[in-house]
Image: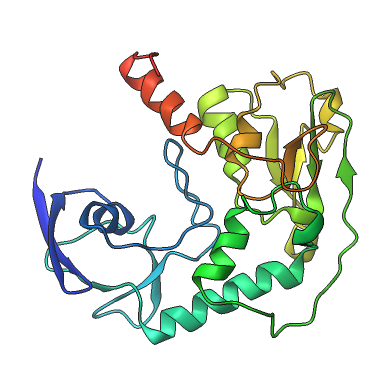
Amino acid sequence: MSVVTLTIDDKAIAIEEGATVLQAAKEAGVPIPTLCHLEGVSEAAACRLCMVEVEGSNKLTPACVTEVSEEMVVHTNTEKLQDYRRMTVELLFSEGNHVCAICVANGNCELQDMAITVGMDHSRFKYQFPKREVDLSHPLFGIDHNRCILCTRCVRVCDEIEGAHVWDVAYRGAECKIVSGLSQPWGTVDACTSCGKCVDACPTGSIFHKGETTAEKIGDRQKVEFLATARKDQQWTR
């Protein structure tokens, strides 16, 4: 396979053709913030936090779905990008009902960690306080739509690894949300295998095990990557 050479934050990198900017940055040890990215499943470019600046382009580019090209020059941490990412996280908080103090994922939440990473200590935007429901119809799990950031990681892990396709995205704009089945209560969806992969894939406290209380959700972030690799290589020892 052909090799492409590019520059990311003044670092010269050589990587196979077809790789993404995010993969190249990871290989070079250059951190790029993400929320919707999850090793082992396809990219969705939903969170827009991995946006980078590419010389020669007048727009920001999502690193997770942008393929590298020869002599590409990428900047990942400019002042413009820092402001953009901080604004994006502020909007995620203002558009939902993220009350960290009573969340099952408090202290183990990727959105919470991202707020610290981008330097967010308040939101400049008016909080919307949307009316969103909590579905506790499943015997083992629950989903709190107030904490959902529409990263679609649950959708992709259920579809691509478990093969059940319980989850999907429905509606538009401010009404957009994750639905189970054909917008049925989760507990009534026969396709659900109760595997719990969506719980581990969820970056916030939106999908959780029943019985968990404040700060008790500790997801296994490597489980999905392991399952994807094991299926591909037929190696099931962990």
Is residue 161 found left or right of 2 in the rendered image?
Answer: right
Q: Position of residue 227 (x, y in %)?
A: 45, 24
Determine the residue positioned at 51% across, 73% down. Answer: 118
Is residue 1 found left or right of 188 in the rendered image?
Answer: left
Q: Position of residue 137 (x, y in %)?
A: 89, 30
In the rendered view, tell whether residue 129 sits above or below residue 2. below
Q: Quadrant of the N terminus?
A: top left
Number of marks in picture: 0
Determine the residue positioned at 67% across, 57% down. Answer: 149
Judge by depth and name the residue closer to the eye, 193 or 140. Answer: 140
Is residue 165 found left or right of 69 in the rendered image?
Answer: right
Question: Can you tell which quarter of the image residue 121 is in?
Answer: bottom right
In the rendered view, tell whether residue 142 sits above or below residue 66. above
Determine the residue positioned at 35% across, 82% down. Answer: 78
Determine the residue positioned at 57% across, 23% down. Answer: 163
Q: Position of residue 16 (x, y in %)?
A: 15, 47
In the rendered view, tell whether residue 60 sits above or below residue 230. below
Is residue 79 found left or right of 148 in the rendered image?
Answer: left
Judge by depth and name the residue closer to the eye, 69 or 112. Answer: 112
Q: Quadrant of the C terminus?
A: top left
Q: How is the image coloured?
A: rainbow
In the rendered view, tell whether residue 180 sits above or below residue 175. above
Q: Position of residue 82 (x, y in %)?
A: 45, 79
